[in-house]
Amino acid sequence: MDVMDKETLEPERLAQNAPRLETVVQLLNRPALTRVYVYVCYWGPVAPPEIMETLELSKSTTYEYIDTLVELGLVDRDDSTRPQQLTADPIIIAEQFVPIVITPTVLHALALQEVDEDVEYFMDRYGLGKLIAALRGAGLHFAGKTTQRMVATDIVVRDTEAMMIIYALEPALAVGREHDPFFEYLFPDVYDEIDFLELDEIADSPSNASDLDG
């Protein structure tokens, strides 16, 4: 995976990309907002009433989040139809020299803390960096490359915590495998080997996608 090259690292290019990074920071700091972005990204075009119903949000909250995402340039709003239609392009932030990759799958995992107590606990205790590490470990586990205990050792958490977070992140992996165009960046070695026993059906229907919430 050659995401970063000399041209990408030129100061002029980095300055041009700075606003893009700032928008991602907004998502990382606001998981409830991220949840709406990921839903629109995966299932768009969608209308606000669908978001309200599927994610169980109030009307005022839904439109507040939509307005914010539009202002950030993360969501496009087509006002020529009624109801308005929303779409969002998938984003990726990849740093070659510090092994961090942010894709819709990662953002989905982050957003799960809004509705999943296990993810909320893990985020509160360990933070985003270790959540991304756990997501990678979970993918390797579902690809049959590692055990839960090995994941626990690799990311330095208790065995019970590793088991908990691996299965809590399964919905993000299942939906991401089908709808995240950058999923391969997270799992370049095993993306076509990841398999789930029970959750494959959620990837094809937004109404069954655990509302993007596990």
Image: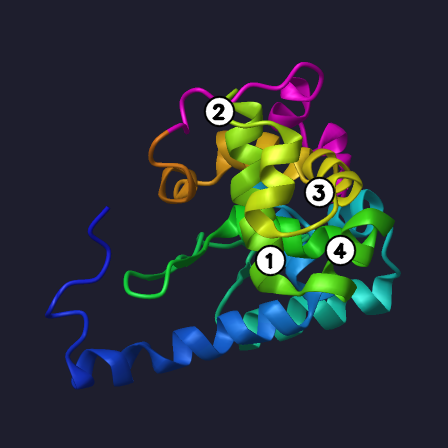
Q: Is residue 78 above or below residue 197?
A: below
Q: Is residue 133 above or below residue 198?
A: below
Can you tell which quarter of the image residue 214 is in?
top right
Q: Looking at the image, is mark 1 or mark 2 earlier in the sequence? A: 1
Residue at the image position 38 percent from the left and 59 percent from the top: 99
Helix, strand or loop under label 3? helix
Residue 184, x across and y down, in percent: 37, 37
Q: Nearer the viewer, residue 27 or 121?
A: 121
- Three-letter amino acid code of the residue under disc 3: Leu
- Three-letter amino acid code of the residue under disc 1: Lys
Residue at the image position 60 percent from the left and 44 percent from the top: 153
Q: Nearer the viewer, residue 196 or 89?
A: 196
Q: CA distance from mark 2 to mark 3?
A: 26 Å
Residue at the image position 18 percent from the left and 85 percent from the top: 11
Kindly identify which residue carries mark 2: 145
Kindly identify which residue carries mark 1: 130
Kindly identify which residue carries mark 3: 212
Q: Label 1: how many residues lie within 10 Å, few (<14), some (14-19) or many (20+)? A: some
Mark nearest the camera among 2 and 4 is 2
Q: Looking at the image, is mark 2 or mark 4 earlier in the sequence? A: 4
Mark nearest the camera among 2 and 3 is 2
Q: Looking at the image, is mark 2 or mark 3 earlier in the sequence? A: 2
Residue 208 in the magenta stretch? The answer is yes
Q: Nearer the viewer, residue 19 or 89?
A: 19
- Residue lying at the far top in this picture: please name it: 197
Q: CA distance from mark 1 to mark 2?
A: 19 Å
